[in-house]
Image (tube, rainbow, N blue to C red):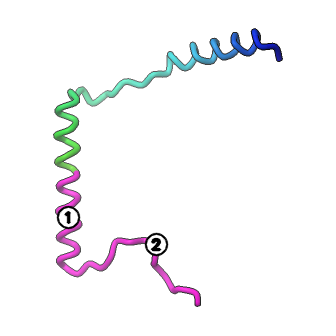
């Protein structure tokens, strides 16, 4: 393939990708999105802390099952 042909092909591919740009559909401003995400993370941390306080065991999935020796 010659260099000029490759450039033309790349231009066509780039044009095709430009049409596929996704827009956020939640209708929130960046500040509102940050607040929503922070609230979700706080709830998740509180749930995890409550589970640990109740003796729910570990949430580490690396060492589950029997170990080979």
Say whether residue 29 is left or right of residue 25: left
Q: Which residue is mark 1?
A: 47
Nearest the eye: 23 or 2? 2
Q: State whether residue 18 is above or below residue 22.
A: above
Q: Position of residue 23 (x, y in %)?
A: 37, 24
Check residue 62 in the rendering and tell me which mark sits there, or answer none: 2
Q: Magenta segment range?
A: 41-69
Q: Secondary structure at mark 2?
A: loop
Q: Secondary structure at mark 1?
A: helix
Residue at point 22%, 72% (across, down): 51
Q: State whether residue 50 is above or below residue 36.
A: below
Q: What is the total number of numbered labels drawn onto the structure image?
A: 2
Q: Quadrant of residue 21?
A: top left
Quarter of the image with the C terminus is bottom right
Mark 1 residue crowding within 10 angstroms, few (<14) / some (14–19) / many (20+): few
Say whether residue 63 is left or right of residue 55: right
Q: State whether residue 2 is above or below residue 56.
A: above
Q: Quadrant of residue 7?
A: top right
Check residue 29 in the rendering and tell me which mark sits there, or answer none: none
Q: Position of residue 52 (x, y in %)?
A: 22, 75
Say whether residue 69 is left or right of residue 33: right
Mark 2 residue crowding within 10 angstroms, few (<14) / some (14–19) / many (20+): few
């Amino acid at each position: 393939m010659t260099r000029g042909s490759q450039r033309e092909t790349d231009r066509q591919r780039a044009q095709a990708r430009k049409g596929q740009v996704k827009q956020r559909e939640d209708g929130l401003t960046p500040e509102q999105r940050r607040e929503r995400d922070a609230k979700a993370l706080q709830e998740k941390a509180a749930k995890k802390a409550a589970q640990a306080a109740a003796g729910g065991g570990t949430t580490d999935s690396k060492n589950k099952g029997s170990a080979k020796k």
